[in-house]
Image (cartoon, rainbow, N blue to C red):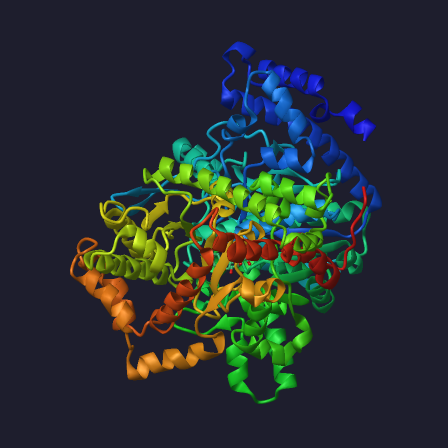
Amino acid sequence: EEKKMENSAVYNKDKFEESFVRHVESDLARNMFNCDDLGAYQAASNAIRDSVLVDWANTQQQQTIHDGKRVYYLSLEFLMGRAMDNALINLDARDQVAEAIGNLGFNLEDVLEQEPDAALGNGGLGRLAACFVDSMSSRNYSAWGYGLNYQYGIFKQEIIDGYQVETPDYWLKYSNPWEVMRSEIQIPVDFYGYVYEHYDTNTGKPKKIWQGGERVIAVPADFPIPGFNTTNTNNLRLWNAKPTMEFDFSKFNNGDYQQSVAAQQRAEALTSVLYPNDNFEKGKELRLRQQYFWVAASLHDIIRRYKKNHKDWDNLSNQVAIQLNDTHPTLAIVELQRILVDLEGLEWNAAWKIVQRVFAYTNHTVMTEALEKWPVDLVGRLIPRHLEIIYEINYFFLKDVEAKFPGDRDLLSRVSIIEEGQVKSVRMAYLAIVGSHKVNGVAELHSELIKTTIFKDFVKIFGPERFTNVTNGITPRRWLRQANPKLAKLISEKLNDPKYEYLTHLGNLKKLENFVNDEAFLKEWDDIKFDNKRKLAALIKETTGVEVDPNVLFDIQVKRIHEYKRQQLNIFAVIYRYLHIKKLLAEGLSVQEIAEKHYIPKASIFGGKAAPGYYMAKIIIHLINTVGEVVNNDPEIGNLLKVVFIPDYNVSKAEIIIPGSDLSNHISTAGTEASGTSNMKFALNGGLIIGTVDGANVEITREIGEENIFLFGNLAESVDELRHKHYYEGVKIPESMQEVFNAIDTGMFGLPEEFKSLLDSIRYHSDYYLATDDFDLFLDAHKKLEKMFGLGSGDPTHLREWVPKSVLSVANMGFFSSDRCIDEYAENIWDVEPLNV
Ligand code: 26W
């Protein structure tokens, strides 16, 4: 502890101020008199980074000396959000730095606001990877993340006239103090070209040689990942694509210098943009190029590190565990086989056994439109040798299947890694399963579903042992301490835990149950919620212009817009509510009477991005906005109902929105949401959930108790039958929903044609996501829960019925820490233990 104070500027105000000024003067080349908040952010970040880098260097050195097994988490997305506040929290230096920054004439909150989000991800999968790197550092594992350093993150969303408009997110407008460029590391990655056979005089055998046609250089940007309450600091390595210095001399000699330079410049385009699709596969060549570039560079790096101390390839899986975050990095399996066979001269079978022991694959979706398939032609052109290896892997695999299940031609064609369809393609999920020793789903229900549906045949072939479950988790450092400092503090006081150790032992939250009858405590708890709602109301006012009263029920749905997540169900219910409030008003009831007897005042709050090419999702956004336009401008309705769409939902906004929720919606069609992770974030912040029996909602219910969550809707096991019924007997629209459709069709919310295809997908195209089957159940669940809410803060019903549920939710969320989740991966999949540096 004392040493900490001596060594590091972040624990010593005077030293921090000195360091800050030095960074202003020498890094920014400014002086304190013209240093604005942005300058202060950069100088402060640099000063904090200096401390992080000391821990980082020590950690890496210790890990190298120890020479134990390392974990490599390959993810095409890391949705990190802001780094500065997180670093201060994990270093336990926030108070000191806040004071030092104050002494220098700045306000920490304002300074933190300057940092752009690192939004290098789409949604759940990317944010999960970010929570995981936090937990891997905090739990003292030796683990690296590998990804791409996109110059453009997920697009920024503006809402113009009620429509989503995308603008580029050039997040590196100012230099990024949190990245360390490693220009000295330059890894060549080849594309295209051809394969030839060469007689190897050493072995007397023929050997395959791949002669690449185009070369790009991979240069890493490293992001230190400090753990909480430990000096363990891992590395997140994100690759940049750079041109080679090797010019095309034939072009050059032909006087085509311009073109030669232009071709070079294209290299940088490789890592320029994150693909904005979530749960939808669109086989674009540049995307496959990104995947191979990233995988080849990462494996080269991993193998280079291994070779420094090791010669025996059989030992590779004792030193290296590689986790594939979905199928996006599946080519790593092929690349490692190529390295071992073609470059290191191992025999095929020996190499393949090593490969299988090294890799494990996490599946995040059962939706078939999201499963990656790459046309054989494209793969063969881009990476010709890899296509040959894929064919060979498939050949040996199918041979084994044939030996195990002789004569089952149907089975062979069902499980073949190559799909013989209209466009012959590589099925990446099958390749990932065949090349891994473990495959996991991300919540119990999901892990069961993949075994009985999309991967059923593989359970038969490899046995159930290859398949396992690791229920997702979230980091309580960001999602409680950082997002909700007041609640985190109250908890630390109640648990008698001034050092916030519960943030790494989240099961300790259980002790909050002791206070569930303590009225003063409940009041304190509710006051914090009210305060968070005020902050959220301010964000709403600032981003939409709409004023919402923090006393009303905040009913929130924020997540990517997708038909399966059913924002349409939610907005239909809002319209239904509006129509019925209007009826009561027309009958002469006052707003007050309606609030007391029929519909409690509430604000329906939405947010989330639609993939730019997802037509239906964009219609849903438009409908939410036009409903808001009508409702919010209705002079009769007072605060009974407000409808807002917060533009550009991202990690930083989530940190404000989630703590301010009374109720959040996780209402996917049963069986479609693999896990969900925002459900965990909301519950950990004392919001109640209305949800379907889907994904992690099931386990959340088990942990917090079914009286503390509002579940509704048809179960996953009924979905097939209901779809079948819709298809053969037609869709039955419930009366309640018909009222809503009539209102839309008569133009209450703008031109009905604009919403026609959304309504038609339900009434004429089989209602695939079962909105009609769950609508009345959804309305019923609302009726039930609204009684319990009472009339918000101060109301005795509210304090007696609602707030205790909020406390009990938080008290029982310990299981959903990503620390637990990472420990499970470590024990059951990676076979690694923490290393105390
Ligand atoms: C190839 C296009 C594409 C892009 C992204 C396909 C699939 C994806 C992701 C796997 C989608 C995703 O983010 N899935 C979410 O993963 C979360 C973390 O496990 C789960 O909590 C969500 O339920 C799941 O939708």
Residue at image coords 63%, 22%: 99
Res 292 visible: no
Quarter residue 206 falls in: bottom right
Which residue corresponds to the image point at 67% horizontal and 71% vertical from the top-left? 466
Q: Residue at x 67, y 26 (%)?
A: 96
Quadrant in the picture for residue 355: bottom right
Q: Which image quarter is the N terminus in?
A: top right
| Residue 108 screen position, x and y as percent | 56, 26
Residue 16 seen in render: yes
Q: Is residue 398 above or below residue 814?
A: below
Looking at this view, is 726 or 714 the one in front? 714
705 left or right of 352 in image: left
Front-lying residue, 629 or 618? 629
Above/below status of 449 relative to 613: below
Q: Quadrant of the C terminus?
A: top right
639 displayed left or right of 687? left
Residue 362 image point, x, y percent: 60, 62
Q: Nearer the viewer, residue 309 or 221?
A: 221
Q: Position of residue 570 (x, y in %)?
A: 36, 60
**Percent position (x, y) of residue 142?**
74, 47
State the count of labels. Answer: 0
Relative to 690, 580 lies left or right? left
Say which of 615 and 211 sits in front: 615
- Tell me: 786 left or right of 303: left
Where on the picture, by quarter, is residue 393? bottom right
Q: Residue visible at 59% across and 22% down?
A: 43
